[in-house]
Image (cartoon, rainbow, N blue to C red):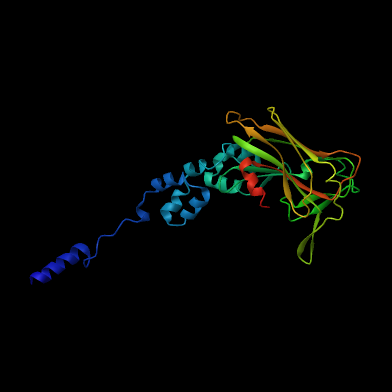
Amino acid sequence: MGTGSSSLALESEGGSGSSPSRPNLDDVPESCVSSIFMYLDPPDICKLAKLNRTFHGASLADFVWETKLPSNYKFLVQKVLGQSPESLSKKEIYARLCRPNSFDGGTKQVWLDKSSGKICVAVSYKALRITGIDDRRYWNHISSEESRFNTIAYLQQIWWFEVGGELEFEFPAGTYSLLFRLQLGKPSKKLGRRTCNCDRVHGWDIKPVRFQLSTSDGQQASSECYLHQQGNWGHHHVGDFAVDSTNAAPLKLKFSMMQIDCTHTKGGVCLDSVLVCPSEFREKLKQF
């Protein structure tokens, strides 16, 4: 009798002697999870959001994503997305800005690096001033899947090579690099495989190409290099510029590349675009 009574008592208190349920992730308050998310990178937040409803709800908090957005995100939403920043959640703003967004008639693109939230801007050759660009004796416009703008300019031959451009943009504080994306040789596809015709490449090993950069706040940079790598796209560094956190006004950039020694012709180069990116991204560009 005594033993039977003890067993019944245990069953009624602990459910057949089982131990009390332990705390799990569902028991963590959503506000606590959101506070932790503030210190994580966006890709990690998106992975953890799949764990359960609490983590998913925490991943939607505006204050979490506002810490990931660049300081000029309101400018980007208005200029690039054409919407009011108040009409979108901060997570949606981040997601949409991470995609390539065209502006200025499709001749420029801006996007955020998904991991860091830092800004990159690309300017198509169509927005640049190029000597002889409208003369088919010198330049050809070629459709290409290798360009984010789907078109590149190919130089057959010219005596005076000069390319210049401008960009006015509101950059967050930081140090940025400006680079020209070029390739020696004419790309094409043969039997579904990429090929590059370098027969017309000439003149770039005689004199160096001169690159220049200046900003509206007085910064200047220049560099020179011979073009020699054939068959692959390369990012040619022009120079760096810094944006101060106290300067919220748009910064105007002027940039150029030229080889104007008229003692010889030069040709066989493809011009795609100009890239402005955080200076620490230059190492990544060397991989392509």
Q: In which quarter of the image is the N terminus?
A: bottom left
Say left or right for 223 vs 100: right
Quarter of the image for residue 82 reads top right
On the image, the x and y values in percent for residue 22 come to 30, 58
Q: Does residue 185 show up?
A: yes
At which x and y percent is residue 49? 47, 54
In the image, residue 164 sits, relative to residue 98, either above or below, namely: above
Q: In this view, does 246 lie above or below 256?
A: above
Q: Residue at x 37, y 55 (%)?
A: 26
Q: Give the percent coordinates (x, y) of residue 92.
A: 55, 47
Q: Which residue is drawn at 12% across and 67% down?
A: 6
> Observer-nearest residue: 171 or 158?
158
At 66% across and 48% down in the image, what residue appears? 285
Near-viewer residue (285 or 13): 285
Residue ranking furthest to the front: 206
* Observer-nearest of 212 and 114: 212
Number of numbered discs on residues: 0
Residue 191 percent location from the top left of the image: 78, 67
Q: Visible in this render: residue 163?
A: no
Q: In this view, does 29 lie to the left or right of 261?
A: left
